[in-house]
Image (cartoon, grey):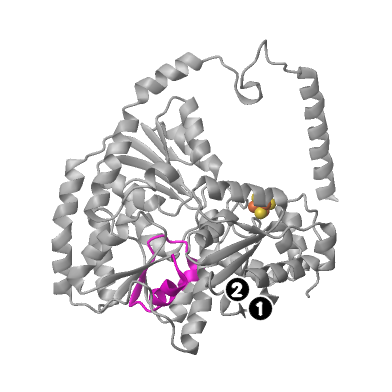
Amino acid sequence: MSAQGHIPDAGLGCHAKDEMTQAARKAGASEVLDRYAADYPQGPHDKPQSMCPAFGSLRVGLRMKRVATVLSGSACCVYGLTFVSHFYGARRSVGYVPFNSESLVTGKLFEDIRDAVHELADPDRYDAVVVTNLCVPTASGVPLRLLPREINGVRIVGIDVPGFGVPTHAEAKDVLAGAMLNYARKEAEAGPVAAPEGGVSDRPTVTLLGEMFPADPMIIGQMLAPLGLAVGPVVPCREWRELYAALDCGAVAAIHPFYTAAVREFEAAGRPIVGSAPVGVDGTEMWLKNIGQAFGISQEKISEAQNAILPAIRGALAAAPIKGRITVSGYEGSELLVARLLIESGAEVPYVGTACAKSAWSAADAEWLEAHGARVKFRASLEDDCAAMEALEPDLAIGTTPVVQKAKERGTPSLYFTNLISARPLMGPAGAGSLATVVNAAMGNRERMGKMRAFFEGVGTGDSAGVWEGDPNIRADFRATNLKKLEKKARAAKAEEMI
Ligand code: SF4
């Protein structure tokens, strides 16, 4: 057992980044934290501003066939994560190994996790069991790496996904995808592995990185066919065997650009990585060229593939124009692709904010967007997104829940990125026309939003929002006292800094 004597307060969490990081480093987690810092560079903001990052990896595990997931963390975190998983339609139970200060201090928690894993590891039911350390067990150094690698043929994958090391839930998907690919790569190197249930393609394949609308891989497959290529699995995969097929590709398309750990595994397997995605005319043209070159395909054949698809995309874009100014922000990793499509549809997009970090695989998209008048902000904070929306006064704000809420308060039409934009095809001709319907309908709502705003004008806001029988009970004297306290605290902190 590694040192588990540096126990952070179990009540600390997302809002105590520094304390948790210090505790985790003292408990021997420096290696993993350094790797995360390199894989998922932070700044300008360094705290998750969306849901708990562990939701990303949890969801990846829950969507895989014959994979059991177990969380180790504070009960409140696990409650929240389980709730959100079922809200998003998880059809499986989330395993939980509870702990208290004593079991954390004595190392009993690790033994409890090991017992739970042994109990779960039934090869008739599972290919793998994923155990995830949330913030407190990570900060306490609960050593998941000491779990058996395999029990009765069931693989055991332990990961740390602390909110103080993994900035977004998108990147947490990469933590698990990378860990699974690493495991599968070592299995493949050690000897023959099982073929996927759907069989193996007779053509060289392109593995797709990033969760996407189910029709997108099919559309990409049609675009690849003239090149003599086929579409391979989508990573994160839906079953363990797909991991081998994913690794066995000819090239990897980093459709979502934040899969750093997964890319590391593909590179270790000797696979080239191609950034951006086949969105719109320019995006598709460039992507087919880059894919063709990665496979050493002749320029003539690449042009054939481009000519086979680009007229259809041009036609779809022309048939579904978008007019108006739109700001785009989100935390899914596909924000830049959506913005490209909007611009090619005719929209003006002055701002694109993504919570994900800059990477080599979104560089071409950022360059294209900037050349078309958009300011691209990587690791954008909620404050950046809201400030852009307020300053640019768009006809439509596409964003996360709090951005959408703020836009509504201002009477600006808005669309929630995750549910309304991510849930549509983006690639090829299908993607070209798919955004216009929802975007144009939302922009047409401005007048209605204005009426609603006028109707609710004067209704309480902030801490006086809600239903009140009489006037909100605002205690100006309490506020003044509290303000004095805060000022005193700030002065004391400043004085301490100067010592
Ligand atoms: S596990 Fe998630 S919800 Fe819990 S403290 Fe960490 S980041 Fe916050």
**Whole-percent x, y for residue 72 in the image:** 69, 60
Which residue is disc 1 drawn over? Answer: 148
Q: Residue at x 22, y 63 (%)?
A: 222
Q: CA distance from mark 2 to mark 1?
A: 7 Å
Which residue is disc 2 drawn over? Answer: 156
Amino acid under label 2?
Ile
Amino acid under label 1?
Pro
Q: Residue at x 30, y 55 (%)?
A: 215
**Residue farthest bottom in this picture:** 191
> N-terminal of the two: label 2 or label 1?
1
Per the rendered image, the range of residues in magenta is: 238-263
Tag count: 2
Instruction: Please report contact status of discs 2 and 1: CB closer than 8 Å, yes or no.
Output: yes
Determine which quarter of the picture holds residue 427.
bottom left
Q: Secondary structure under badge 1?
A: loop
Position of 327 with respect to 284 (left or right) is right
